[in-house]
């Protein structure tokens, strides 16, 4: 008894009070879910049964009503924000929880819309959640939903559209708030919620929402609850995303298809012209040869380098899975490549191949180029640089299909059709409040957090950074093999529990 008492006293003396509070919060949600796991999942399945494609306004409204009622029940003040002149735009669900004496405001972003789903491509109805004993890829089998008294295995999975992207934060947040309320554990921050109803449609109206209701969204840190954890399963915090833009390039040969026997070796061949043009943009090692393409890229910082060092070395495993014996920039890791702009040929078209191939010289050749942007790159400026390079290769650039007069006047013609896009976003890893989030997650997970300077993908987060001028971090909880956007999307139940643990620690951090 004496030893136990001494150990307890020692723990109290040497453990910060903030850590004790967070430990109590994590323990409270764990105890709560041990008792209420059945209802947490049952309520979640009810939400998953409501289709949530942004264009389906009737069902989107059902989703917003469900979530508004659920959060109000947990003590949040909720409001549906609309754009008066756009009645068919999904509402932003806004919520607040005021904490007396709190000196910090956290704004949590989740999107409640999802990708469309074609039932023909799914094993089960995508809007009827189905419980599995494990992942389908590892021979998991459909199982009946357990009785309230039965054990729920964290390795079980729920298969349903939006189960992971991005409804999964909702059951974790709701259960966490319920558990803390029941245990009379106070939050330490003012909390705000921004639930987007058209993220999967590109969030075309999110900037207007931010500008119209800007006063409501004032705070100290945006926390985006979206995306999958690292492949290793370790906790992860992401500090940015790439930007994106692109263009299509069409080059021109003869005004009509020509017999390759009669005109081959005499008439210019558009496919060959385009191949030469594209080869001039990028060499075999991956180096982009367009002048100034990397000039505006923000430098990699010492904090970024330290973050790289926290990452498990998964590159060799990924190469093996993808059948790649080499990569571009062989001395550059996958995560480091996210810090630079890229130029990708998304597609090529000229004539036909296979059984449809004909002995002709086609009239045109077209390439679709994708450009992923790093921090500091402006979409229009990067497109300007590509066009300047095309002109240096002797091409006259047009915006519309050239007529005979233009064709006869210029030796080489390229029609360039620019796409839209938006810039990258990146919060400094050294940001003090972001580091508080990292520490809170480590406290809950009892494991070092992987710090990701940037996702490789793109989200319209720059609108939030630009309008609100507030730092942003991304805290993902979904399993990496969740099939997001694809048939048989799923969530591992243990990842919902993980979300509860880390949210409880974030909500109570000092």
Image: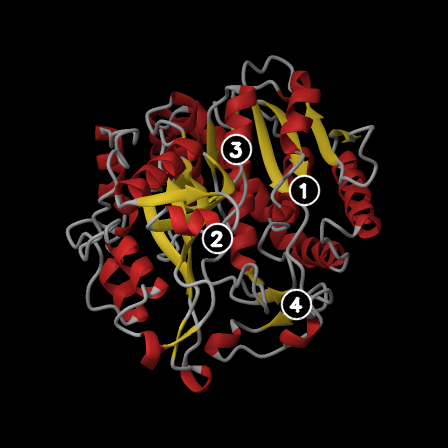
* Residue 294 image offset from top left, x and y in percent: 26, 35
Residue positioned 41% across, 57% down in the render:
252
Residue positioned 40% across, 51% down in the render:
408
Q: How far apart are marks 4 and 1 (CA)?
A: 22 Å
Residue contact at pointers 3 and 2, CB within 8 angstroms: no
Residue at the extreme bottom of the image, as rendered: 355
Disc nearest the viewer among 1 and 2:
2
Tell me if mark 2 has few (under 14), some (14-19) or many (20+) residues whose alpha carbon lies within 10 angstroms of its own. Answer: few
* Residue 380 image offset from top left, x and y in percent: 44, 33
Which residue, given by chain and number where applicable, does mark 1 sit on? 174
Instruction: Kindly tell me whether residue 293 is visible in this rendering.
Output: yes
Residue positioned 28% across, 37% down in the render:
293
Q: Is mark 1 on a helix, strand or loop?
A: helix
- Which callout, 3 or 2, points at the residue further toward the start of the chain? 3
Q: Residue 150 carries which label?
A: 4
Tell me if mark 1 has few (under 14), some (14-19) or many (20+) residues whose alpha carbon lies within 10 angstroms of its own. Answer: some
Residue contact at pointers 4 and 3, CB within 8 angstroms: no
Residue 183, by quadrant, is top right
Residue 269, by quadrant, is bottom left
* Residue 411 image offset from top left, x and y in percent: 32, 50
Q: Residue 223 carries which label?
A: 3
Which residue, given by chain and number where applicable, does mark 2 sit on? 404
Q: Is mark 4 on a helix, strand or loop?
A: loop
Left or right of 71 on screen, residue 114: left
């Amino acid at each position: 008894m004496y030893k136990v008492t001494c150990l307890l006293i020692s723990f109290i003396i040497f453990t910060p009070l903030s850590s004790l509070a967070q430990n109590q919060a994590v323990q409270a949600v764990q105890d709560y879910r041990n008792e209420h796991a059945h209802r947490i999942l049952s309520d979640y399945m009810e939400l998953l049964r409501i289709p949530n494609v942004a264009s389906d306004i009737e069902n989107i409204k059902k989703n917003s009503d469900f979530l508004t009622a659920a959060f109000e029940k947990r003590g949040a003040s909720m409001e549906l924000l609309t754009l008066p002149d756009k009645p068919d735009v999904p509402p932003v669900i806004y919520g607040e929880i005021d904490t007396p004496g709190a000196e910090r405001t956290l704004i949590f972003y989740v999107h409640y819309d999802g990708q469309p789903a074609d039932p023909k491509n799914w094993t089960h109805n995508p809007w009827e959640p189905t419980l599995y004993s494990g992942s389908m890829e590892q021979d998991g089998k459909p199982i009946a939903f357990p009785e309230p008294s039965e054990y729920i295995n964290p390795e079980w999975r729920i298969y349903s559209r939006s189960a992971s992207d991005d409804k999964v934060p909702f059951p974790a947040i709701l259960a966490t708030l319920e558990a803390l309320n029941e245990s009379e554990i106070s939050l330490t921050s003012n909390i705000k919620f921004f639930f987007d109803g058209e993220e999967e449609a590109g969030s075309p109206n999110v900037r207007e929402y931010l500008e119209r209701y800007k006063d409501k969204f004032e705070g100290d840190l945006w926390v985006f609850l979206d995306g999958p954890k690292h492949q290793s399963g370790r906790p992860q915090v992401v500090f940015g995303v790439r930007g994106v833009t692109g263009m299509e390039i069409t080059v021109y040969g003869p005004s009509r298809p020509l017999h390759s026997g009669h005109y081959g070796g005499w008439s210019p061949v558009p496919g060959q012209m385009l191949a030469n043009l594209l080869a001039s943009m990028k060499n075999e090692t991956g180096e982009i040869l367009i002048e100034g393409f990397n000039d505006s890229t923000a430098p990699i910082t010492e904090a970024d380098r330290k973050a790289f060092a926290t990452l498990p070395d998964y590159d060799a495993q990924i190469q093996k899975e993808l059948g790649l014996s080499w990569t571009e920039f062989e001395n550059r890791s996958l995560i480091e490549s996210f810090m630079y702009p890229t130029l990708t040929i998304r597609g090529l078209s000229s004539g036909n191949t296979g059984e449809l191939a004909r002995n002709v010289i086609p009239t045109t050749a077209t390439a679709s180029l994708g450009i992923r942007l790093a921090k500091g790159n402006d979409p229009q400026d990067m497109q300007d640089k590509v066009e300047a390079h095309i002109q240096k290769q002797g091409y006259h650039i047009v915006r519309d299909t050239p007529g005979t007069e233009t064709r006869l006047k210029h030796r080489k013609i390229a029609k360039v059709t620019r796409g839209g896009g938006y810039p990258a976003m990146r919060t400094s890893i050294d940001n003090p409040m972001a580091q508080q989030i990292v520490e809170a997650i480590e406290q809950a997970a009892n494991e070092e957090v992987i710090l990701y300077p940037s996702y490789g993908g793109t989200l319209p987060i720059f609108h939030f950074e630009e309008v609100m001028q507030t730092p942003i971090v991304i805290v993902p909880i979904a399993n990496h093999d969740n099939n997001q956007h694809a048939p048989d999307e799923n969530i591992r139940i243990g990842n919902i529990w993980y979300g509860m643990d880390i949210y409880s620690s974030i909500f109570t951090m000092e």
